[in-house]
Amino acid sequence: MNPESPICSAKGCRAAAIWVLAWNNPKVHTPERRKTWLACEEHRASLSDFLDIRGFLKDVVTLEEWQARP
């Protein structure tokens, strides 16, 4: 892994990020605002579940897809 490669946002994980979890806390952010967490394959589901249970999760896409967006 390249030292500049994005890493997973899960606590203590140093694996390369593959996924972008786009989220928004409606009590704090405007509707169009997107915050992001990065996830490796192992933590994608648990991080997604954490955000989804709170109603924050808006989108899950590959890092490659996210970086290709305009």
Image (cartoon, grey):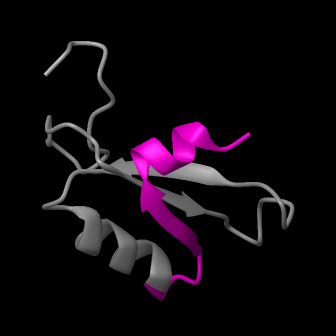
Provide residue 63's location: percent of width, then percent of height: 42, 45
- Residue 61 on the magenta span: yes
The residue at the point 47 percent across, 82 percent down is 52
User: Relative to 61, does residue 52 appear above or below in the rendering?
Assistant: below
The answer to which image quadrant residue 64 occupies is: top left
- Please provide the residue range marked out in magenta: 53-70
Provide residue 42's location: percent of width, then percent of height: 13, 61
Depth check: give the residue in front, 64 or 40.
64
The answer to which image quadrant residue 58 occupies is: bottom right
Tell me: 9 left or right of 37. left
| Placement of the C terminus among the 4 image quadrants | top right
Tell me: 16 left or right of 31. left
Count the labels in the image: 0
Tell me: 7 left or right of 42. right
The residue at the point 38 percent across, 72 percent down is 48
User: Relative to 2, does residue 31 appear above or below in the rendering?
Assistant: below
User: Relative to 39, does residue 46 appear above or below in the rendering?
Assistant: below
Depth check: give the residue in front, 47 or 19.
19
Depth check: give the residue in front, 4 or 57.
4
Provide residue 22's location: percent of width, then percent of height: 56, 59
The residue at the point 29 percent across, 23 percent down is 5
Tell me: 1 left or right of 66. left
User: Relative to 33, does residue 67 appear above or below in the rendering?
Assistant: above
The residue at the point 14 percent across, 39 percent down is 15
Provide residue 6's location: percent of width, then percent of height: 33, 30
| Placement of the N terminus among the 4 image quadrants | top left
